[in-house]
Image: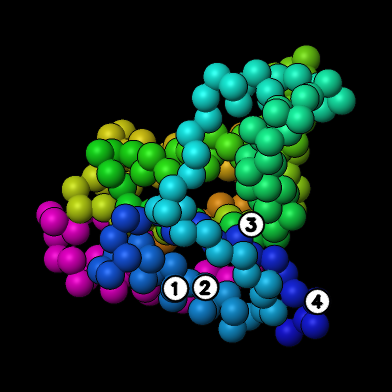
Amino acid sequence: MSDTPLKLLRLDASLDRENSVSRALADKLQAKLESEANLDVTYRDIADGIPRIDSAWREAMLREEDQRTEEDKQILAFSNQLAQELIDTDILLISSPVYNFSVTSDLKNWIDNVCRARMTFKYTEHGPRGLLQNKKAFIVLASNGTKVHSEIDFAGRYLKQIMTFLNITDVNFVVSDQMKKFDRSEKIRAAEESIKKLSI
């Protein structure tokens, strides 16, 4: 195990802090990764709330950095912090339930804050290009009814698209889905088995 720690950014999105399947699976996955490497973990419970971007944020973001006012800088400060955390990390671990076929509102707010032109992606003559390099993502999803990666899934497929957009191409999923339709314990057990096969 290397003495130089890898930076891991973990985000938990479930509103349920007591019985969350996605959080519990993320705990197991984090423990697995920590058994393989020296990790420096930054943790955010984004269910505590992530500010929604608004028109003032947009105007501040669109200005060139050297043209931003002090008010602009204050408006963007937390977004800058979130984006820089993502830029600095080696491994991204996101856990989330599937709510209404999609991600939670706070996870969407986090995405809106970190998808930053000139920071995490840039516009080119061939379209936007992600600026993140050499990162690995693990996405843990739990659902009661939605089949992840199906045509009605706007959580897993959306998160995969966001990773691709930012140039994170090594993306691994841990899924315990349709737990109301099938045996819940079997679904969780299968997800736990998939964790054993993952590695840094």
Q: Position of residue 67 (x, y in %)?
A: 83, 21
Res 184 quadrant in image: bottom left
Dot 4 or dot 2, earlier in sequence: 4
| 104 is higher (above) or lower (below) than 56 | below
Task: Give the alpha-carbon distance from disc 4 to disc 2, as whole Å.
Answer: 18 Å
Which of label 3 and label 4 is nearer to you? 4
Task: Give the alpha-carbon distance from disc 4 to disc 1, as whole Å.
Answer: 22 Å
Q: Which residue is mark 2?
A: 30
Task: Give the alpha-carbon distance from disc 2 to disc 3, as whole Å.
Answer: 13 Å
Is residue 117 shown to the viewer in this render?
A: no
The stretch in magenta equals 175-200
Q: Residue at x 52, y 24 (%)?
A: 54
Q: Amino acid at mark 2?
A: Gln
Which mark, by number, is residue 136?
Answer: 3
Q: Residue at x 68, y 72 (%)?
A: 40
Q: Which residue is mark 1?
A: 27
Which mark, by number, is residue 4?
Answer: 4
Q: Position of residue 11 (x, y in %)?
A: 50, 57
88 sits to left or right of 52: right
- The color scheme shown is rainbow
Q: Residues within 10 Å of mark 2 (few under 14, many from 20)?
A: some
Q: Are marks 1 and 2 in contact (CB under 8 Å)?
A: yes
Q: Amino acid at mark 3?
A: Lys
Q: Position of residue 30 (x, y in %)?
A: 52, 73
